[in-house]
Amino acid sequence: MYVLKFGGSSVADSKCMLNVVDILRKRNNEKILLVLSACQGITNKLEQVSSEALNNNKENSKILCDEIRSLHLNIINYTLKNSRIKRNACYKVNTLCDELENLLVGVSLLKELIPQVMDRIYAFGECLSTNIFYYIALEHGLKIIWKDARNFIKTDSNFLSANILEQQTKEHCKELYKEFNNYDIIVTQGFIGSDEFGHTTTLGRGGSDLSAAVFGNAMSAECIEIWTDVNGVLSADPRLISEAKSIPVMRYTTVKEMAFWGAKVLHPKTILPAIKNNIPVKILNSFEPENQGTIIESELYSNSTSVHSIVVKQKCSMLSIAIDESSKYIEVLTSVIKYLSENDFHLLYSVYSNQSISLIVDGELNDVIIDNKTIYRSIVNAICIVGENFTNNIEEFSKITNSINYCLINNHSKLLGMHIISKHTILLIIDSSNINMLVKDIHQKLI
C-alpha cells in the first residue's frame, strides 16, 4: 500500500486534477491512499472570508464565498461529462458552500471567531477538493471511495495546531484499511482531524504532509509520496542557480539541516512519523511524473564522500563578545541569548572559547549594549554545504576545501570561519560583496 499526497498546486484546477487521475491510472495494480490539499489559494480565501465575516462586511464576504463556489463548480464543468455524476458533484459542492455561508453568518452575528470555529472553516477547502476529485475519478473508471479524514486522524483539542494522538489514530486506521478489500483508491483530506469530542481540528504548518506521514505510519505503507510542483529536493535554490539538480537520495538529518538554514524543502517535522518507522518518503513533481525526484530515508549506508546541496543565508549578523577575567562566561552568554530571544532574533550558530563568544544571528542587528557590555556586530553571509561523509576520507574532504578556497580567491571573498557541524554538514561564514556569484562558483565546482 502506498500513500500519495498531492498539494494545492497539484489540484489547482481541472487540468491539474485530470493530471492526478492520469498518474493514478498508470498505477492500477497498487492500493493507494490518496491525500489531497485544498485547491491552490482556497485556504487563503477561507481566511479572508472569515475576517470579512468577523468584521460584518457582508458584501465582501458574499463575493469571496461566490468565488470559492465558482472555482469548484468550474472544475466540475470542465472535467465531468456524465450527467448523473456531474449533478451529484454539483450538489455536493453547493451543499458544502451553503454550510460554509451559514457558518460565516454565525461568525458575523456573534462577532467572534474562536480557533475551534476557524478550524471548521479551514476544513471546507479539503472537503471540497477531495469530493470533486472523487467524482472525476469515478467518471474515469477508478475504483475509488471518499472518506472523511476526521474519522481517522485523531488529535488533541489544540485548535489550529493540533497534536496527533498516535495510538487512537492507528486503531481507527485499521477500519480504513479494510476498504482496500473493495477499492483500489481511498481519497481523503490532508490537514484536518478531530478531537475526542468530534470537533474538527487542523494540524498547522505543513499539515497535509503530516497527514500523509501519519496515515502511512498507521497503515504500514510501503512508501509515502509527496507530489509537488518541483523535482524533489534540489542542489541549490533554482532562483539563484538555474542549473540546480535533483538529489536522488537523502538522509532525513540532511533535509533537516537544509531546512534550518532556509532551504525551501519539505518541513522535516511533517515527515517525522514516517522516518521514525523507516518508511521512505519520495518527493515528486506532479507536472513531470517521469522525473525520479528525491527519496528521503532515515539513514543511508554509504561510505563515499559527496556534496548534495548548497544553502545560502545572506545578511546575517555575527556578534563578537570578548570575555575578560572579570566576566562570568555563563552569565554573559545567558544575557545575550535572553536578549536575542526577547527581540525575536533567531540564533543560527555559536562558537565559544575561553576568550570570546561568536554568535551568528539571522537578520541585521545593530551594535547593542547588554549588561554594560558592548556587543559588536558585523554583517556576514552563511553558506551551508550538506552531503555525505565529509570526515570519512581526508583526501576527499581536502578536495572539497581546496575547491572552496579557489572560489573564495576567485571572487575576492573572505572566509571568516569554516565549521564542521557534523560529518554531513559544513558551515562557511563569508564576507563577500558578491555572494551570489560565489555560491554559483562553489555549486559548479562541487556539484
Image (cartoon, rainbow, N blue to C red):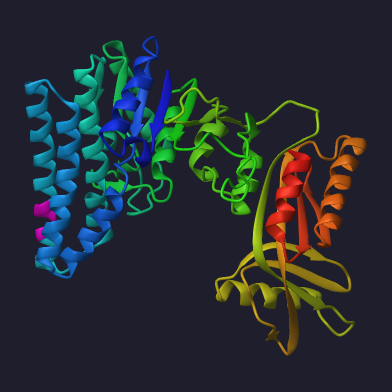
In magenta, the rendered stretch is 101-105
Q: Residue 41 location, x and y as percent?
A: 30, 49
361 left or right of 37 in image = right
Between 81 and 379, the one lying in front of the other is 81
| Viewer can see residue 277 | yes
State the quadrant of the N terminus.
top left
| Left or right: residue 27 compared with residue 391 | left
Quadrant in the picture for residue 36? top left
Residue 310: give x, y in percent of width and height.
Answer: 69, 47
Q: Residue furthest bottom?
A: 372
In the figure, is residue 277 to the left or right of 82? right
Q: How many marks are shown on the rendered structure? A: 0
The C terminus - image quarter? top right
- Please provide percent x and percent y for residue 83: 7, 22
Residue 183 counted in the magenta span: no
**Residue at figure coordinates x 13%, y 30% from the top left:** 89
Residue 86: give x, y in percent of width and height: 11, 27
Say whether residue 197 is visible: no
Task: Decide: is 345 above or below 274.
Answer: below
Asked if residue 199 is positioned above or below residue 4 in the image, the reply reads: below
Residue, far right: 395
Q: Is residue 83 above or below residue 183?
A: below
Residue shown at 85% from the left, 78% from the top: 323
Q: Is residue 317 left or right of residue 264?
A: right
Asked which quadrant contains residue 249, the reply is top right
Magenta segment main secondary structure:
helix
Q: Residue at x 81, y 54 (%)?
A: 419
